[in-house]
Amino acid sequence: MKVLLKSGILLAVFLLMTDAVQAQKFGYVNSGLLVGELPEMKQLQSSLEALQTQLKKKGEAEVAKFKQEEQAAVQKKQRGEMTPKEEEEVMTKLQKMQDDIYAMGTEMEQKLAEKQQEGMKPILEKVDTAIKAVATEGGFQYIFDTQAGVILYADETADVTDLVKEKMNM
């Protein structure tokens, strides 16, 4: 009798666990598509391109200044108007200018990366909030991101990208 009772309880627990697993609801979303279609993303791309153009012009001006100084020094040396000490000073000055240009290039890249990261934060938060709202409202336990490339197969009926777009008023 005890064995039968234990078997019955074990069977009931197994059936309840099976129902719980079957009740889980999964969905997937393409976050890259969502982010790319947001007006905020298009504005961010525009501002990044404008900043990049501005920084590029500044860098090109510095390079032009360097080339002008270098050319003047070469001409002065060719005419024999430069002492060895002056030549050494000019070379040191040109080397410093070149180092400054390289440093400025690195600084420009950092500025662009920081601006992009700063601009992406609210965009990603908006997408995340909408995904969580869709998951809660739709009863999804898991929503995967096809952009991350971890889904090997997905039934198209589980795609919640359109629901998330609606949630973001797109």
Image (cartoon, rainbow, N blue to C red):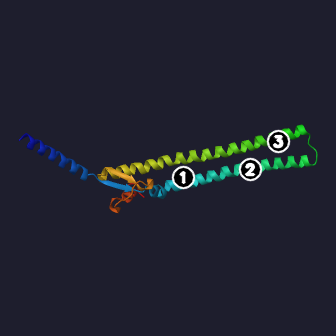
Q: Look at label 3 and name its amino acid.
A: Met
Q: Is residue 48 left or right of residue 34?
A: right
At 64% across and 46% down in the image, what residue appears? Answer: 108
Question: What residue is pinned by disc 2?
Answer: 61
At 44% across and 55% down in the image, what residue appears? Answer: 147
Q: Mark 3 vs mark 2: which is more N-terminal?
A: 2
Question: What residue is pinned by disc 3?
Answer: 91
Residue occupying the far left of the picture: 1
Q: Secondary structure at mark 1?
A: helix
In the rendered image, the quadrant that contains the N terminus is: top left
- x, y percent for residue 85: 89, 37
- x, y percent for residue 64: 77, 51
The answer to whether the residues at label 2 and label 1 have Cβ atoms under 8 Å apart is no
Question: What residue is pinned by disc 1?
Answer: 44
At 87% across and 48% down in the image, what residue appears? Answer: 74
Compared with 91, 159 (above or below) is below
Residue in the foreground of this view, choosing between 131 and 27: 27
Q: Look at label 1 and name its amino acid.
A: Leu
Residue in the foreground of this view, choosing between 61 and 151: 151
Mark pair 1, 3: CA separation: 42 Å
At 72% across and 51% down in the image, what residue appears? Answer: 60
